Image (cartoon, helix red, strand yellow):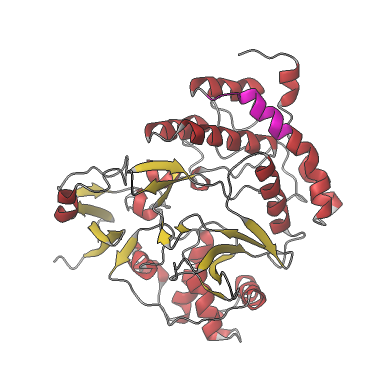
Amino acid sequence: MNKNIEQIQIKLFNIEIGIIAYDTVKAVSYFQYSQSFLNSNKYKNIFPFIIKRIPQIQVFKNTDDVFRNLPSVFADSLPDSFGNQLFNIWADLNKIDPSKLTPIHQLGYLGNRAMGALEFYPAKVLFKDVNNINLNDINNILNKVLQSKENVSNLKLDELGLLNIIKMGFSAGGARAKVIVSEHKITKELIPGDINISDNYNHFLVKFPKINDKYNRELVEYSYYKSAIDSNIDMMPTKLIENKYFTTKRYDRQHGKKIHVLTASGISGLAFNNKNNDKLSYNNLFKIANEINISPKDMQQLFARMVFNYTFHNIDDHFKNHSFMYNENNDRWTITPAYDINYSLDALAKWHNAPHNLSLYGKRNDIKTSDILRLATEYNIKKPKKIIREIYKVSLKWKSLAIKLNIPMNVIDSIQKDFKNYNKDLKKGLKI
């Protein structure tokens, strides 16, 4: 084999589906399906758009940083900014230059610990597991590490504890500090959640407050979760631990099985952070959902989430914050439960009329009720005005909910000023 070529095996549901190879000189990747997988005729729809179901080698070169010249369906497994921070800390501890590690290396370190169901072999072992964990200990170590400006190896930390935080947080997506844990259903013991998928455990993603935040954003996210549930938006069960750790069940670990999941970015090949791309829009999100043939009920859900994001001013509505999950029994896709629904701005450092990550008919702010209803008409959404009214009514209750959660009043007032009232146009008898 060419010494410039690195490769790794891809598995899904314990079946080898193919090989991904990477040319370190050309910065090009190659994917080829396993012939035995193609012959099996199984799981025809696991990659709807990006990878053709053919035996020939397929070549990929994508200059967007988030994909790192991999097919987006596999780059979807790579860590985001927080996970990369942890990976760089691990590299620092092991005296490795992270800039010399290819995306194939990172997939190898993820191994069978990636979010979703894709697995990468041969897996590289980071370190041994530990059993018991404590969220307060994790939070203390995370804050020391993330706030430190000195070499991590100089910090006086429990090395085993730090390494296991890296292991539990490396695969988690997003920008804020988080780890994946598993809680025994009977004993309530917490263990690292990167390997165990047993149905004896509930599997959670835990978000941590930053020490330099002026208020607890996890409390705000919990208030948005409660409001979303009241708006009949499907979300995984979520709780606050010690009134500060936002803890939500993982939808990619259910009934002791891994669920194959792709974000809208991964499934479409559109880099979620390229705001100059006109295709990063709700119009295109609905088009993607329609083309993978999700159910009318799921389309209603997607519409409600869009309305909620506009009403509650969740501008962090990019393509990695919308995902789809695959049903291996019927070879069909459904929408995942909603996640990362939050007021993503700093409420105490206002940015007036901040634009949404996703546009609607070319607009990222100043969205009108007529724009929302126009999209509803395009995709045959039933009773869109009722959805708008119900979410508006929920927004009127948010302040009292936030007060009960002890969110500071100046934060509450600042956030609420950004809420949008799309119901007022309906009262005027708006017609589309």
Q: Is residue 383 magenta?
A: yes
| Quadrant of the frame with the N terminus | bottom left
Residue 264, relative to residue 427: is it above or below? below
Q: Which residue is farthest front?
A: 186
| Quadrant of the frame with the C terminus | top right
Q: Which residue is farthest right?
A: 409
The secondary structure that dominates the magenta segment is: helix
Which residue is pictured at 70% across the width and 32% down the height? 390
What x and y, as percent, mark residue 275?
A: 51, 40
Q: Is residue 202 magenta?
A: no
What x and y, as percent, mark residue 230?
A: 69, 42
Q: Total marks drawn? A: 0
* Left or right placement of residue 80 versus residue 233 in this view: left
Residue 69, relative to residue 183: is it above or below? above
What x and y, as percent, mark residue 425?
A: 72, 20
Q: Quadrant of residue 94?
A: bottom left
Instruction: Please name whichever residue, 101 or 331, is drawn nearer the observer in this view of the structure.
Output: 331
Q: Quadrant of residue 358?
A: top right
Which residues lie in the magenta part? 381-392
Q: Is residue 414 visible?
A: yes
Residue 123, relative to residue 174: is it above or below? below
Which residue is pictured at 62% across the width and 47% down the height? 341
What x and y, as percent, mark residue 246?
A: 65, 60
* Left or right placement of residue 194 versus residue 430 in this view: left
* Left or right placement of residue 306 versus residue 283 in this view: right
Which residue is pictured at 40% across the width and 73% down the height? 97
Instruction: Please name whichever residue, 250 or 412, is drawn nearer the observer in this view of the structure.
Output: 250
Q: Is residue 418 visible?
A: no
